[in-house]
Image (tube, rainbow, N blue to C red):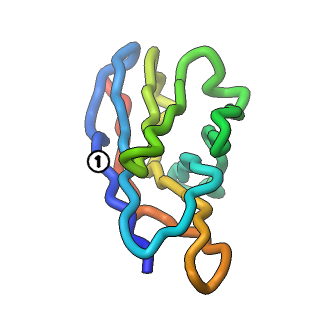
């Protein structure tokens, strides 16, 4: 199976920064797309950013120019650098990794980490 461990959430003031990380482990043959989603209270889960195996990135319009997604293939880890944080960025952030295991493609989700932006 595949395990994802997230870290880096917390409380930050508006305009501050946080970096989330998500490390994958288990019986992984290959990691394809890695991404971050978020879900605020009363709202649907939404894609924040994604990065392909080749490094092509995609961002939600609301976070462009403020967030940066990156990956370290040697460590099976994806990062989300969040700058200029706003109260509307408050949500539970989940990492999502599409992997290839012996049984075929598999979508793995992290346990979620709370990000709260408040003064």
Badge 1 crowding class, 10 Å Cα cut-off, few under 14, some 14 to 19, many 20 or more, is some
The residue depicted at 49 percent of the width and 38 percent of the height is 71
Q: Does 71 appear above or below 36?
A: above
Please state the horizontal and vertical placement of residue 1, each as a whole percent of the image.
Answer: 43, 81
- Give the residue number, with chain letter if any, for mark 1: 7
Does residue 30 lie above or below 21 as drawn? below
- Above or below, 41 against 105 in this view is above
In the image, 23 versus 54, the foreground residue is: 54
Q: Residue at x 44, y 18 (%)?
A: 83
Which of the 4 quarters of the picture holds residue 54?
A: top right
Query: Which residue occupies the foreground of this view, 46 or 80?
Result: 80
The front one of 31 and 8 is 31
Quadrant in which the C terminus is drawn = top left
Image coords of residue 90 (percent x, y): 45, 38
Work out whether 60 lies above or below 41: above
Q: Is residue 6 left or right of residue 103?
A: left
Residue 106 position within the rendered picture, expressed as x and y whole percent measured from the top left: 61, 74
């Amino acid at each position: 199976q595949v395990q994802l461990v997230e870290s880096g959430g917390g409380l930050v003031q508006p305009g501050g920064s946080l970096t989330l990380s998500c490390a994958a482990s288990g019986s992984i043959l290959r990691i394809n797309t890695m991404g971050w989603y978020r879900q605020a209270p009363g709202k649907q889960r939404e894609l924040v950013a994604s990065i392909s195996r080749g490094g092509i990135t995609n961002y939600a319009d609301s976070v462009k120019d403020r967030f940066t997604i990156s990956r370290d293939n040697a460590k099976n880890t994806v990062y989300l650098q969040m700058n200029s944080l706003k109260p509307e960025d408050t949500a539970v952030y989940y990492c999502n990794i599409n992997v290839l295991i012996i049984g075929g493609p598999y979508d793995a989700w992290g346990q979620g980490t709370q990000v709260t932006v408040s003064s």
